[in-house]
Amino acid sequence: MSLSDPYTEMFTLTNEGYAPVTQLQIDCLLKIRAIKFGQEGGFSFPMRAPIDPARVLGHESRITVPCIVKISGLEPTAGSKLDITISYAFWHLNLPWLRRSETFHFLSIGSTDSQHWQIL
């Protein structure tokens, strides 16, 4: 986690299956835990990663996906959460009941000097 831009993350998505996938949709939900003046609160920021939906991800293919949330004035706080939901269709089968999705949950741990995301 970068201290200059703590809530922007890049991650690599790899198709480890044998069937090509398409119609990728990646949603990031950042839940920031904030402590100001001794009071604890939180903010949620949904974001859809800018990916070409026509892109085909074949076997062992990988792409870099950005979860970009620009927030000024908030220090990184341990206990913030990041949920990344990846949904996709198998090649030429973009039917609602055949689409697959998976959500990955991350937790920010550390101090204000050093933060990193840990998968839950």
Image (cartoon, rainbow, N blue to C red):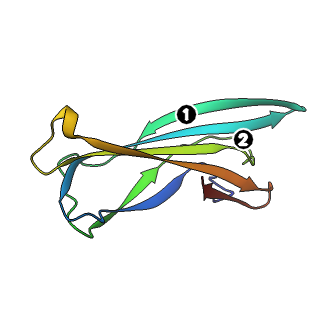
Residue under the point 47% across and 49% down: 67
As drawn, 35 above or below 114: above
Question: Mark 2, residues whose alpha carbon is within 10 Å: few (<14), some, or many (≥20)?
Answer: some
The residue beneath circle 1 is 45
Q: Position of residue 90 (x, y in %)?
A: 17, 50
* Marks 1/2: CA–CA distance: 13 Å
Q: Position of residue 93 (x, y in %)?
A: 12, 44
Residue 102's place in the image compared with 42, above or below, is below
Q: Residue at x 79, y 60 (%)?
A: 113
Q: Residues within 10 Å of mark 1 (few under 14, many from 20)?
A: few
Q: Nearer the viewer, residue 70 or 61?
A: 61
Q: Is residue 12 left or right of residue 91?
A: right
Q: Residue furthest left?
A: 92
Q: Amino acid at mark 1?
A: Phe
Vertical relation: 6 (above or below) 94: below
* SS assignment at label 1: strand
Q: Secondary structure at mark 2?
A: loop
Residue 74, numbered circle = 2
Residue 31: x and y in percent read 62, 37
Query: As drawn, is 69 to the left or to the right of 25?
Result: right
In the displayed structure, would residue 42 be above or below residue 27?
A: above
